[in-house]
Each structure stands twice: as C-alpha cells, then as structure tokens.
Amino acid sequence: MSQQPIEQIEISLRASELNLRKNALDELGKFSADVAIPVLQRLSQEPDFALRRLAVMGLGNHRTNESFQALQRIIEKDEDANVLAEAANSIFEFGEQAIPVLSGLFKRSQNWLVRQTVISLLVETTSYADLLEIAKIAITDPTQTVKEAGILALGQILKSPLQQQALEILTQLSYSPDWRTRWRVAIALQHSQAPQAKQLISQLQQDEHYRVVAAALEVATGNN
C-alpha cells in the first residue's frame, strides 16, 4: 500500500472526524523522523488542545533527540493538563533522561491528572530517590487520589535501599484521621517484611474502619 502524500496527512491531522486524525497519525508514523517531526511540531502549536495532544502522541513514536527536545519544550510551556499528561507518557518512552523532566513537571503542576500520570510512570522505574521526593509532595496534595498514589509509591520504595525512609513516612500516615489514608498505608506495607512494617500491619488490624482492617488482614495473611 502506497503512502499518502505528506501534505494530505498534515491536512487530515486537523480533520474534524477523529478517525481521520487517527488514521493520519498512523500514516505519519511510517515516515522518517526528519519528515514527521516538523509536521508534529507545527501541530503542537495549534490552539486546539486535542490537536496538541495528538502531536505529543506522534512525537513519542520517533525516538530521536529532536523529538525529545520537542516534548520537553511542550512540557515546559503548555498549560493544558490533557496535553501535559499525554506528553509525560510519550517522553517516558525515552528512558532515564526523561526522569528529571517528569519530576520537574510534577513539581510545577498542581493538576491531579498530571500528577497521577507522573507518579504512575515513575513507579515503573528504579529511580527510587526521585520517586521518594515526588511521593513526599504527593502525600500533601489536597486531592485524595493523588495522595493515595503517593502512599502506594512509598510501597514501591519499600523494595529499595530507601526502605527505612519510606517506612518512617508510612508510620506517620498510619495515624491519619482519614481512613482512606490508613487503608492505602496497609496496602503499601505488603511490599515489606521488615519488623517495623509487620508491627504497623498488626496495629492496623485493630483499626476502627473495616476496610483498613480487611486490607491489613489480607497483607498479614499474604506475608506469612
């Protein structure tokens, strides 16, 4: 099957029909980076956030330094949470060099979608120091889901050399008046066999909220 002319693809990327946009993006992926990236850079300047989001999706398909820099600029300058979250997903594919960019994005943005996206990406890495720094910020976030994501990130850190620091934070959180926080602490503790973690699980089995108790009992059973 022959390729569509690049000019037609660039027009189709801006079509009102979503299926035409998707097909155009798929077609663009068949072109070399030196042809595709300028098209995507122009698309990333559009006022419509949906088009800018499409642009960052496309940039993630081309693992070049130029594409990385384009995504980095978008992350630094764009203000739409949907675009930023998608850009975070795309730049993550570039590996370790994306970690500082993602950490910086988390610190700058107060948006729950952006923050949850960044945390979900960082927990897949072994950059535990960066994850710990982000988790400390997340647990102070006013949005409960971001806070809970931060607690679960601490659970991942329990599998690292930074285990003791994570345990100390989880211990403090286990006394939170919010049952959802204590519930997430119980779940996070499944990743540790340390005596301090087992003591916390024992404590949470006596919690006043049944969901916290259930989570703690499940972890205790699974760790035996």
Image (tube, helix red, strand yellow):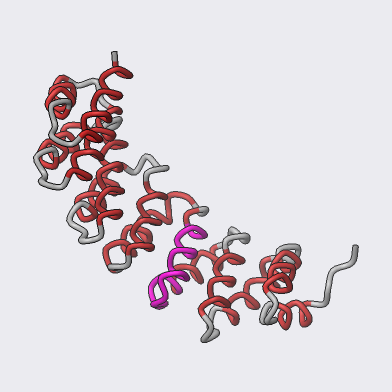
Image spot of residue 157 (x, y percent): 28, 37
**Residue found 70% across the figure and 77% down from its top:** 17
Q: Is residue 13 above or below residue 162?
A: below
Q: Is residue 49 above or below residue 150?
A: below
**Residue found 13% across the figure and 34% down from its top:** 208
Q: Which residues are magenta?
A: 74-91
Closer-to-camera residue (175/191): 175
In which quadrant of the rendered image does the N terminus lie?
bottom right
- Direction from residue 155 to residue 34 in the image, left or right: right
Image spot of residue 122 (x, y percent): 38, 48
Image spot of residue 96 (x, y percent): 43, 49
Q: Is residue 164 above or below residue 142?
A: above
- Direction from residue 214 to residue 204 in the image, left or right: left
Image spot of residue 117 (x, y percent): 40, 56
Q: Main secondary structure of the magenta part?
A: helix
Give the quadrant of residue 67.
bottom right
Closer-to-camera residue (85/33): 85
Give the quadrant of residue 188.
top left
Q: Residue furthest top?
A: 224
- In reply to whether residue 173 is colored magenta, the answer given is no
**Residue found 38% across the figure and 62% down from its top:** 113
